Image: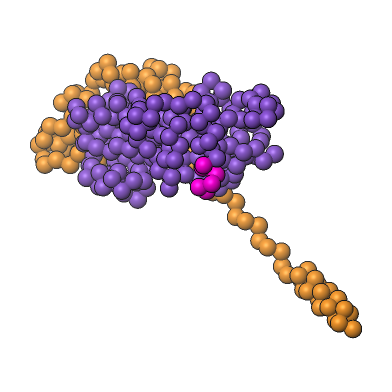
Chain colours: A orange, B purple
């Protein structure tokens, strides 16, 4: 009698288990972030000319950009706070253009490169106005 | 955990050891930083005793196999002289390993630079494993701070030689985190981290 009852209970549990909704599949993992590398090149005061070290850095970035399939390159120029803001905006763009030209000369497709100039915005090191600061006179190259 | 470590340490003594005094001078990777995890071997680089493993939850991680990983190379033998298959891509393995750990985070000075180079030259040793011949390697990342991240506990550093900006591994020690909070963009910084190192790999299948 007891065995029969136990068997019925066991069957009932088994049937109940079958009625449960299947567990939702675990969510798919988020897509891996795009590989990204970035560099900085620095400039002399009031200059948009790449020195040897900057040219070497741009060459390295170009090599990575060419090696990555369908890569895009974002080039952003900056200045320090020395000089008028409007002039610095134009100077930062000239710096970005100089880097783009060097990238293209190294074999990166012009169409893959986006440039912009930020002027005195986005100072790496916060300074008062009219302050010469090499670390702020820069171009950032992002390859992804 | 401790029993497992004792066994590993016992294995290491067989392979010879550095003098005890030299061992004591080395930075020590604390036991609390040890991880145990199961993953699948993606690739093996015998030239560097490196291997890439895919964790189910963390993706790919590149590890170095310390000399404590006695089954790294194919054909290595066990205590019973049974040839082992060595680590191969596709194997599912249980790994005891250390993640990156910061040993030095400081504004760059001549003294700090010298200290960093000495640390890298000496390497570190794992706590409780004083006789491991192949130490846990240390690496230096130095340059100018571009960004500090007080959420991820990392620093973006521009390499003065190459211009490349690299992000440090996550800073984990209290001393490192205290130093991180004092840094700001533009500061010269010197950092030393241990590299990710496996000390035991058990082949599951």
**Residue B129 visible to an observer of this rendering:** yes
Residue B83 on the magenta segment: no
* Viewer-side residue, A91 vs B9: B9
Left/right placement of residue A73 relative to residue B9 reads left
Name the residue located 53 percent from the left edge and 36 percent from the top edge: B10
Name, please, the residue furthest toward the bottom. A1
* Viewer-side residue, A10 vs A93: A10
- Image quadrant where residue B117 sits: top left
Taken as a whole, is the magenta stretch helix, strand or loop? helix
Image location (x, y in percent) of residue B35: 50, 45
Image location (x, y in percent) of residue A33: 48, 41
Residue B3 on the magenta segment: yes
Name the residue located 36 percent from the left edge and 46 percent from the top edge: B172
Name the residue located 50 percent from the left edge and 37 percent from the top edge: B9
* Viewer-side residue, A58 vs B20: B20
Residue B79's place in the image compared with A120, above or below, is above
- Image quadrant where residue B167 sits: top left
Name the residue located 50 percent from the left edge and 40 percent from the top edge: B97
Number of callouts in the render? 0
**Residue A138 visible to an observer of this rendering:** no
- Image quadrant where residue B88 sits: top right
Left/right placement of residue A76 relative to residue B65 reads left
The quadrant of the image that shows the C terminus of chain B is: top right
Image location (x, y in percent) of residue B27: 34, 35
Left/right placement of residue B30 relative to residue A85 reads right
Residue B90's place in the image compared with A15, above or below, is above
Looking at the rendering, the stretch of residues picked out in magenta corresponds to B1-6
Image location (x, y in percent) of residue B70: 58, 30
């Amino acid at each position: 009698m007891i065995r029969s009852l136990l068997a019925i209970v066991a069957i009932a549990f088994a049937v109940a288990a079958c009625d449960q909704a299947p567990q939702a599949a675990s969510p798919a993992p988020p897509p891996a972030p795009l590989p990204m590398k970035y560099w900085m090149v620095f400039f002399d005061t009031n200059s948009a000319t790449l020195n040897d070290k900057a040219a070497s850095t741009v060459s390295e970035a170009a090599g990575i950009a060419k090696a990555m399939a369908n890569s895009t390159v974002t080039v952003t120029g900056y200045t320090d706070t020395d000089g008028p803001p409007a002039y610095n905006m134009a100077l930062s763009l000239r710096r970005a253009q100089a880097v783009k030209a060097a990238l293209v000369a190294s074999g990166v497709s012009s169409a893959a490169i986006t440039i912009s100039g930020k002027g005195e915005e986005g100072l790496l090191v916060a300074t008062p106005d009219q302050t010469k600061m090499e670390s702020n006179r820069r171009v950032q190259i992002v390859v992804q | 955990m401790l029993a497992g470590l004792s066994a590993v340490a016992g294995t290491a003594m067989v392979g010879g050891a550095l003098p005890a005094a030299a061992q004591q001078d080395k930075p020590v990777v604390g036991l609390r930083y040890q991880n145990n995890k199961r993953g699948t071997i993606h690739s093996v680089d015998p030239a560097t005793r490196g291997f890439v493993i895919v964790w189910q939850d963390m993706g790919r991680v590149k590890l170095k196999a310390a000399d404590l990983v006695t089954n790294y190379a194919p054909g290595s033998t066990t205590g019973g002289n049974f040839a082992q298959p060595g680590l191969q891509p596709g194997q599912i393995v249980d790994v005891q390993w250390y993640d990156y750990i910061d040993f030095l985070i400081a504004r760059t000075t001549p003294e700090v630079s010298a200290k960093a180079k000495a640390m890298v030259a000496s390497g570190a040793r794992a706590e409780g494993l004083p006789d491991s011949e192949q130490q846990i390697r240390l690496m230096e990342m130095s340059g100018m701070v571009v960004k500090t991240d007080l959420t991820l506990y990392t620093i973006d550093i521009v390499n003065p030689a190459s211009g490349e900006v690299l992000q440090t591994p996550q800073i984990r020690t209290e001393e490192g985190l205290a130093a991180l909070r004092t840094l700001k963009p533009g500061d010269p910084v010197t950092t030393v981290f241990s590299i990710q190192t496996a000390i035991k790999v058990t082949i599951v299948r």
